Image (tube, helix red, strand yellow):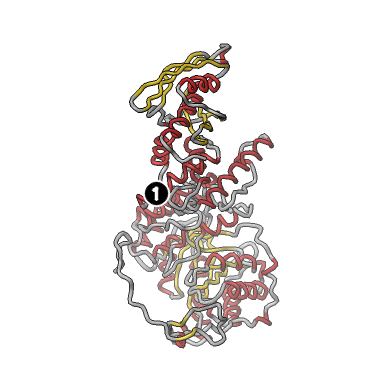
């Protein structure tokens, strides 16, 4: 039983290293062997000799989406600790239809009353759109095939998916059948499927055949078997047969699977009447790569599940595979405009969470904590805005080129608020990004550096990330607090409104004494400097930056000031509904920070 990650576990009692991992290991590699049972495992024998394959797939690129087939309701469902009930199945089917799937494997109707009844529900309640074809799975057994056709009574469009195991281990260990008897079993089943379809003249029934564990089957045997089944079903371009080649248990690198698919693609009889399909599993964690290389090798169709649910480590993840296409400018022909909504429905239906790091869809996949990453992302967004401004378009119409983000989160219905999150690893770029995107405050770079130090100290002390609310509190406490030593008591005149002069009154409290200062000038800055001189504080130079702001906390105008006094240079910030107030608050902030000994630059 696993221990909650919220509880600190003891260190496991691991084996002591025995010796160097191999002879001739270079001096710069100090790794030792922990004596794993390597003698028990062997690299799989190559099913296709390299010399027999004139590889073309390495030089090909994917240009179009494949025909997608979701197997969430069959292969995915049978792998769940708690298989879906009819309500959850119906919800997931509706989601798949809404996303644009045109082939959906809806169950294994001969395996259980639940699957049978669900197929009947879809047909009898007319829940299957005219352009959607449901698929039903059946092993190569007569009574199971007959039961499968019973479930389809009244359907408009369907695929009957026939499967039998063909690999040597399955033939020997599971079924005790030789190649000849396996072939006869498949052909007898194919004939029975054909006769079942003949009894449904009003339905458009197509056929699919899977030699289970194809990737472990001798290629010549798999080819002969697939050709024989397709011929028995009289495959034609107008009524193509789907030949589905699963890597039922992934045991080798993706290039080997690609070799197998290309060899079949180039040697199948009547190839123009075949839809060549792949069904990669993820035992080695490379199902997506296997599917992509298989598409380069000639596959027309891909079976998989949303977020990769399935037996053991799962099926190929269709979300990842499809969005990989989108990042290359290829239309995936599926709708991912609300990725979070899709994820929530799938999690509810399967009662299993999608990992926070799952590609494209996890909670944290568009989030950067590292300071260097955050700075690059911020600069990428700035460049995107500048390019859009120059072109006279919206940023969302510009080519997407933002470091560390392979896809625009907004194209998947995500906001930018979670792209950068602040913790002790974050830097000024991340803090600047959050203040800009959440509050529309663009801090000068030296001020960013000051604030990042304060934020990192708080994150280190608390041992947790700093969200926008806490970040605002830190910023406000450090820069917007303006009445501890010095405050503006009154000011009048607004040159922007036509007034010639500005008057500023300040109150400076030092050693229990109150000193009043008054100054006049052509603007707030010059009047403020005169008033401060009357209080005994000489401002040598001062610079002020103003900008529009947003959010209830900010008002409409933000101002930042850099004031140089005998104590050094200090930054300050001010927020107000007008420029005059914002500038005076920023200047007061700078002086107060200098007086209270804040870090200066």
Where does the image place residue 571, in percent across and percent down from the top left? 50, 35
Residue 192 in sight:
no
Label 1, on which residue? Answer: 459
Label 1: how many residues lie within 10 Å, few (<14), some (14-19) or many (20+)? some
Where does the image place residue 269, in percent across and percent down from the top left? 66, 74
Residue 269 to residue 99: above or below: below
| Relative to 268, 372 lies left or right | left
| Relative to 273, 479 lies left or right | left
Q: Quadrant of the N terminus?
A: bottom left
Residue 438 in sight:
yes
| Relative to 188, 263 lies left or right | right
Q: Quadrant of residue 139?
A: bottom left
Task: Please tell me whether mark 1 sits on a helix, a strand or a loop.
Answer: helix
Residue 410 to residue 50: above or below: above
- How many tags in the picture? 1
Q: Nearer the viewer, residue 333 or 373?
A: 373
Q: Quadrant of residue 80?
A: bottom left
Q: Nearer the viewer, residue 290 or 395?
A: 395
Q: Nearer the viewer, residue 195 or 83?
A: 83
Q: Nearer the viewer, residue 14 or 57?
A: 14
Name the residue rendered at 58%, 82% in the picture.
47
Residue 376 to residue 20: above or below: above
Where does the image place residue 473, in percent across and percent down from the top left? 39, 37
Where does the image place residue 120, in percent across and percent down from the top left? 39, 57
Name the residue rendered at 47%, 38% in the picture.
438
Name the residue rendered at 58%, 43% in the picture.
381
């Amino acid at each position: 039983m696993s221990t909650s990650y919220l509880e600190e576990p003891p260190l496991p009692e691991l084996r002591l290293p025995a010796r160097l991992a191999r002879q001739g290991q270079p001096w710069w590699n100090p790794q030792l062997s922990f004596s794993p049972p390597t003698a028990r495992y062997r690299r799989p024998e190559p099913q296709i000799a390299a010399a027999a394959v004139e590889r073309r797939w390495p030089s090909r690129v994917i240009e179009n989406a494949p025909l997608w087939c979701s197997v969430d309701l069959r292969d995915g469902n049978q792998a769940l600790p708690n298989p879906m009930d009819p309500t959850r199945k119906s919800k997931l089917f509706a989601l798949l239809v809404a996303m644009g799937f045109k082939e959906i494997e809806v169950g294994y109707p001969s395996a259980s009353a639940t699957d049978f009844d669900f197929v009947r529900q879809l047909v009898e309640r007319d829940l299957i759109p005219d352009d959607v074809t449901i698929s039903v799975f059946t092993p190569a057994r007569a009574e199971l095939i007959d039961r499968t056709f019973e479930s389809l009574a009244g359907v408009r469009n369907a695929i009957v998916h026939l499967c039998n195991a063909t690999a040597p281990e399955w033939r020997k260990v599971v079924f005790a059948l030789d190649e000849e008897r396996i072939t006869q079993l498949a052909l007898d089943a194919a004939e029975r499927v054909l006769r079942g379809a003949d009894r449904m003249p009003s339905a458009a029934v197509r056929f699919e055949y899977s030699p289970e564990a194809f990737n472990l089957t001798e290629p010549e045997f798999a080819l002969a078997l697939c050709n024989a089944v397709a011929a028995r079903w009289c495959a034609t371009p107008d009524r193509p047969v789907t030949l589905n080649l699963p890597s039922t248990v992934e045991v080798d690198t993706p290039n080997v699977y690609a070799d197998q698919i290309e060899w079949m693609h180039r040697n199948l009889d009547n190839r123009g009447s075949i839809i060549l399909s792949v069904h990669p599993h993820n035992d080695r964690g490379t199902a997506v790569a296997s599917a992509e290389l298989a598409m380069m090798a000639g596959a027309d169709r891909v079976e998989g599940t949303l977020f990769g649910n399935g037996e053991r480590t799962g099926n190929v993840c269709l979300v990842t595979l499809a969005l990989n296409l989108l990042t290359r400018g290829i239309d995936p022909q599926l709708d991912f405009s609300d990725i979070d909504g899709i994820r929530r429905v799938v999690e509810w239906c399967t009662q299993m969470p999608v990992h926070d790091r799952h590609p494209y869809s996890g909670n944290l996949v568009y989030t950067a904590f590292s300071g260097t990453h955050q700075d690059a992302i911020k600069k990428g967004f700035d460049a995107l805005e500048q390019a859009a401004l120059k072109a006279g378009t919206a940023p969302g119409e510009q080519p997407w080129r933002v470091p560390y983000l392979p896809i625009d989160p907004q194209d998947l219905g995500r906001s930018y608020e979670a792209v950068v999150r602040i913790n002790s690893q974050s830097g000024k770029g991340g803090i600047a990004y959050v203040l800009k995107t959440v509050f529309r405050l663009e801090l000068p770079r030296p001020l960013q550096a000051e604030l990042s130090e304060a934020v990192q100290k708080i994150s280190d002390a608390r041992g947790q990330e700093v969200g926008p609310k806490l970040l605002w509190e830190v910023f406000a406490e450090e820069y917007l607090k303006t009445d501890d030593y010095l405050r503006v008591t009154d000011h009048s005149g607004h040159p922007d409104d036509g007034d010639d002069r500005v008057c500023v009154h300040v109150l400076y409290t030092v050693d229990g004494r109150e000193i009043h200062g008054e100054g006049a000038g052509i603007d707030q800055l010059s009047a403020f400097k005169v008033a401060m001189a009357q209080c005994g504080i000489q401002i040598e130079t001062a610079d002020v930056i103003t900008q529009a702001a947003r959010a209830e906390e900010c008002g409409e105008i933000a101002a930042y000031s850099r004031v140089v006094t005998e104590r050094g240079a200090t930054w300050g910030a001010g927020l107000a509904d007008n420029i005059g107030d914002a500038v005076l608050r920023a200047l007061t902030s700078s002086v107060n920070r200098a007086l209270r000994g804040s870090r200066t630059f």
